[in-house]
Amino acid sequence: MTPENVSSTSKTCQTCGSRLSENATRCLVCGRTFTPAATKKTETSPVQNPKLPELKVSLPAAIALIVLILGLGAALIFVILQTTGRVTTPTATPTVTNTPTLTLTPTATLEPTLGPTPTPVPPREYVVKEGDLCSSIALSFGVSIQSIASLNGLPPDCGILYPNTTLKIPWPTPTPTALPTATLSAAEATQQACGTVPYQVTENDTLSSISANYNISIESIKTFNGLTSDTVWVGMNLSLPLCERMPTQGPTPTATLLPPYPAASLLLPEDGAVFTNVNESITLQWSSVGTLLEGEAYAVTIEDVTTGGANRLTSYTRETKLTIPSTLRPLDNTFHIYRWSVVAVRQTGTTADGQAEYTPHGTLSQFRVFGWSGAGGAVIPTP
């Protein structure tokens, strides 16, 4: 018996296990009904690309992601450049921080107001006389030999002078002095200008012998040096106040000579002062150089510079002030410049007409100048 060929297109009943044809709708054994299978249709459809996945992120996350990507890219570029040698890694060098120093700001100093400057005047002319020397001419005019030689083109020692030769004499350079704030009294002026003599005590010296030699009282020496007793010792330094000398009442016990007086300090008028009234009374004032003895005085020399020294006067007084005589007042319509100085003098004799003769016994003071306008309202030059 030949076995039945089993169709390759058969199906099995799920209830009884009978084999049925593929198109059977009902099982003949158990009676189960089959639903016909849907016919598969083969349709040709266009090929579609696969859809990419969608990624949704927030804005801050997107910014952070961009920054991260840029940082990674920069790091990658840096590593590539470093490997090629184009970029080197900087070495950190410690920086020394300086400690701030306190700087003091200087306080602005006010510039002092300068006083009036004397108007420059042309040099004086002097005709050489028989027997004149440069030294004597310089001494009489109060200037140096070198200044005369330089102004006249002469050798430094001034050489030989010939009579009737005209020399140009320069004016002494006035030295500015401190301006007084007010007129000093005689006691204040004396105390301010009290000259002293340094003295060192030697063997056998006593305070009374020093007092007798210098004609200064013991109390004055003690007060001036701050001594509380009359005891002195060898090598002790003292300052003897010449302004405390006592009037001479007899011969000095010893032959010790008193030193000359110091230079007086000129007080008024101020250096470079200008007076505009010809009838104005001008008083000169200076400080005392000490107590003047019998026969001693001050020699005050006043000279009209504008007239070339023709109007010149020397007056003697024992006071520390002098009013300019009317004979020196300017009478023409010009502006006059005056120069004055003071020196202590001592009487050495008497002239035939009974006038006292004096010789300098002190240091000549500094010169001062002032201006005085003449009659008729002269134009005053700017100092």
Image (tube, rainbow, N blue to C red):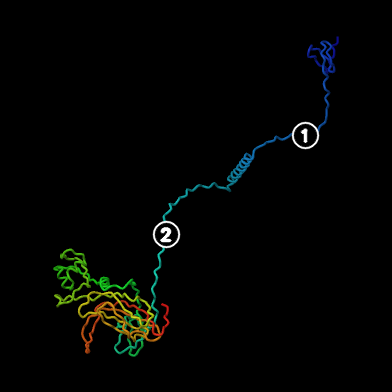
Q: Residue at x 62, y 39 (%)?
A: 61
Q: Residue at x 44, y 52 (%)?
A: 98
Q: Quadrant of residue 201?
A: bottom left
Q: Residue furthest top?
A: 1
The type of residue carrying mark 1 is Gln
Side of 195 where 56 appears, left or right: right
Judging by the rendered image, the residue that carries numbered circle 1 is 48
Q: Is disc 2 placed on a helix, strand or loop? A: loop
Does residue 223 sit above or below 140 in this rendering? above
Q: Quadrant of residue 371?
A: bottom left
Residue 353 percent across, percent down from the top left: 22, 89
- The tag earlier along the polypeptide, 1 or 2, is 1
Residue 345 percent across, percent down from the top left: 24, 80
* Mark identifier at residue 105: 2
The type of residue carrying mark 2 is Thr
Residue 249 percent across, percent down from the top left: 15, 77
Side of 39 where 227 appears, left or right: left
Residue 71 percent across, percent down from the top left: 60, 43
Side of 354 where 163 appears, left or right: right
Does residue 6 sit above or below 276 in this rendering? above
